[in-house]
Amino acid sequence: MRKQIAAANWKMNLTYQQGEKLLDEILHEKHALGAQQQVIFAVPYPYLIMAKSEVANEQNYFVAAQNCHHKKSGAYTGEIAVDMLKSIGIPYCVIGHSERREYFNESNQELAAKLDLLLEQEIQPIFCCGEPLSVREAGNQNEFVEIQLKESLFHLSATQLTKVVIAYEPIWAIGTGKTASSAQAQEMHAFIRSVLSKQYGAEVADSVSILYGGSVKAANADELFSQPDVDGGLVGGASLQSAEFIAIIKALKK
């Protein structure tokens, strides 16, 4: 069975003290995860070491960075290198989030470079892809997402691809309160898996976890996660509330 993952993306929210309190509340629940279940907290850079310490004794709970730079090192003031994340033992890194693509003009080529650096340092990428509303309304979402996948992932070997987690984000459903129906989510996840299958074969494609990332909440997590190709969620706003995120964790497939 593929890894079933509840990934919290805190974005640029919470003070250090608020973040620590939130982690304490979630971990205090003592929800035991199955062998194929994982919880990942993608926290702001200043909180990485604190969050790593919080989950240190918890089975299958991990920490992720929210981004990294596409160059190995250099005169890039304010940026974070993959080597820096490796040096403090961070096992996951989110890349290509729709907000990074939109606000910082990150290209598919830049993301390909980030993937290479992360995999070189044995940090697992959580690679985001997804379409804006205009593309969805025009019915071109499959072609749009396929280009993202091909231009960023298809230079990887099959072995490397199995180390990548994919998060599908219907951009029109992020922070809007709108959510793709479970059928829409399943349809796109199955399409993504079919694109991977054509390039790498069904066995490799079937091993890749594909998360849904569009306004996942406690109220819709069960239905979304019950879909055969939805392997959990990349959760934004609901991950900032302990009761909501605990319910989402409990909705993961067993």
Image (cartoon, rainbow, N blue to C red):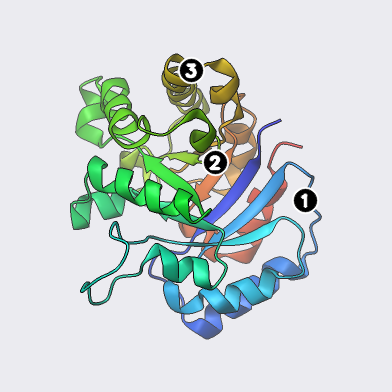
User: For the residue marked with disc 1, what is the amino acid?
Assistant: Leu
Q: CA distance from mark 1 to mark 2?
A: 20 Å
Amino acid type, callout 3: Ser
Around disc 3, counting alpha carbons within 10 Å, would you say few (fewer than 14), some (14 to 19), or many (20 or more)? some
**Residue contact between numbered discs 3 and 1, judged by CB atoms under 8 Å:** no
Q: Earlier in the sequence, mark 1 or mark 2?
A: 1
Q: Which amino acid type is shown beneath numbered disc 2?
A: Lys
The residue at 67%/74% (across/down) is 54
Q: Judge by depth and name the residue closer to the eye, 13 or 175.
A: 13
Q: Look at the numbered disc 1 and give the secondary structure of its residue.
A: loop
In-image side of 142 versus 217 (left or right): left
Mark 3 vs mark 1: which is more N-terminal?
1
Mark 2 surroundings within 10 Å by alpha-carbon count, few (fewer than 14), some (14 through 19), many (20 or more): some
Q: Which numbered mark, 1 or 2, is in the foreground of this view?
A: 2
**The quarter of the displayed image where residue 203 is located:** top right
The answer to whether residue 84 is visible is: yes
Q: Which residue is mark 3?
A: 197
Q: Quadrant of residue 82?
A: bottom left
Secondary structure state at the residue bearing disc 2: loop
Q: Which is nearer the N-term, disc 2 or disc 3? A: 2
Foreground mark, 3 or 1, reads: 3
Q: Is residue 43 visible?
A: no
Write down the residue under mark 1: 33
Q: Residue at x 31, y 48 (%)?
A: 113
Name the residue: 48% across, 20% down: 200
Q: Secondary structure at mark 3?
A: helix
Vertical placement of 186 versus 85: above or below? Answer: above
Picture disc at residue 163: 2
